[in-house]
Amino acid sequence: MSKISQFNTQAQIQEKASLWISRLDRGLTLEEKQELISWMNQNKKHHESLLSLASLWDDLSVLNELSGIFPLEKMHKKHALMPTLAMAASLFLTVITCSSLLLDFSSSDNSNQTIASAIQFYETEIGEQATFTMPDGTSMQLNTNSKVEVTYANNHRKLTLLRGEAKFDVAKDKDRPFTVTSGTQSFTALGTIFNVQKNSEQDMELVVTEGKVLISKSSDLVIDVADKFEQLTIHPLMSSIVSSGQKAVIKDSHSLPIEKISLDQVQRDLAWQQGMLIFDGEPLAKALKEVSRYSNTQFDINDEEIANLKVAGYFKAGDIEGLLQSLRFNFDIRYQTTSKNIITLSLPKA
């Protein structure tokens, strides 16, 4: 007897995904979870449709129910690992505790107030994220283990990213350029939204989600940077300008070609701003290195097969226990705490 495979239309898949969302809303039984896993494993489009609908859902209970139950296919111990295997770790929406700190600068009593030069430091601990409001209305969101030095004066707004990662929603002020210095590079805007990640003194990444940002050397004088910015109206296609929807990577103090990135890529790069990490085909070793930024835990992988496993999915930053449970449930990866902050991962012995 031949086997007949049923091919569903996209509309039918969407309808089934919507049904699962409604079930998730009320909570799944153990049997329903197994049924859902089976449905997800039938077709990659099932996985994509459900996650797409879930991302639009406002109810935390739906997202919590999705936690750790979506491998794209099972891992077989004695077979090669396929690159499409997915690690579905903790899906979530988090409420970030935001603190609004206003700097108290001296000002005159007249309507044309000026902000005197001052230095302030803002920082977060490992696993902490926080949002701060600058005196000009600029919003700054710091990622885990980040530190920024802020210097405001009458003719410029200068910030130094000493470590970590930060998002800046810059208040417009055409008379005072806004410059973020990171290692050997500086990023200047008048009013825009951009994200800077400092990997080292010579390596960093810039993602612009609104407006334009000028890349220059951190050694350039403020007045020179301002002059370059004025040239934007004359030379809008300057190679050092990064526009909305673009990403710049600086490696060894040299800028790589600026790339246009998709909305999905922007969401992956900036998922930390919602307290999430999103992986899409990265080796597990690389994904775990990113996870370690959000906790004091380090991972020791003694199996190359595990290290090279391609993973994809959503992960709650800092939820190490949820991650370990997902690795065990989806891939049968075992773990053992060998010291206070080191976890060893391995496959079961044959």
Image: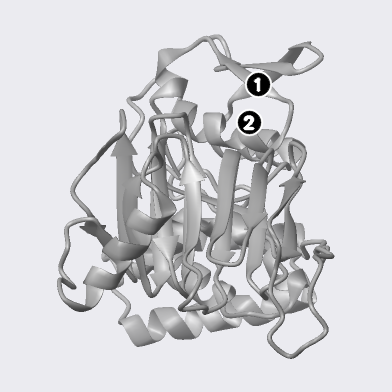
Does residue 300 appear to the left or right of 319 in the view shown? Answer: left
Give the quarter of the image for residue 274.
Answer: bottom right
Q: Which residue is mark 2?
A: 292
x and y, in percent, of residue 202 in the image: 38, 30
Q: Name the residue rendered at 66%, 52% in the picture.
A: 150
Q: Nearer the viewer, residue 84 or 174?
A: 174
Amino acid found under the numbered disc labelled 2: Ser
x and y, in percent, of residue 275 in the image: 67, 56
Q: Nearer the viewer, residue 132 or 350?
A: 132
x and y, in percent, of residue 5 in the image: 28, 65
Does dot 1 land on a helix, a strand or a loop?
Answer: strand
Query: Compared with residue 187, is residue 128 higher up or lower down, i.e. above or below?
Result: above
Q: Which mark is residue 298?
A: 1
Alpha carbon distance from label 2 to label 1: 6 Å
Q: Name the residue rendered at 68%, 57% in the picture.
A: 117
Give the quarter of the image for residue 95.
Answer: bottom right
Crowding around mark 1 (Cα neighbors within 10 Å: few <14, some 14 to 19, many 20+) is some
Does residue 209 appear to the left or right of 295 in the view shown? Answer: left
x and y, in percent, of residue 305 in the image: 41, 19
Q: Name the residue rendered at 30%, 82% in the picture.
A: 9
Q: Quadrant of the N terminus?
A: bottom left
Q: Are marks 2 and 1 in contact (CB under 8 Å)?
A: yes
Does residue 108 appear to the left or right of 43 in the view shown? Answer: right
Q: Nearer the viewer, residue 339 or 189?
A: 189
Does dot 2 land on a helix, a strand or a loop?
Answer: helix
Q: Nearer the viewer, residue 346 or 340?
A: 340
Query: Compared with residue 99, is residue 307 higher up or lower down, i.e. above or below?
Result: above
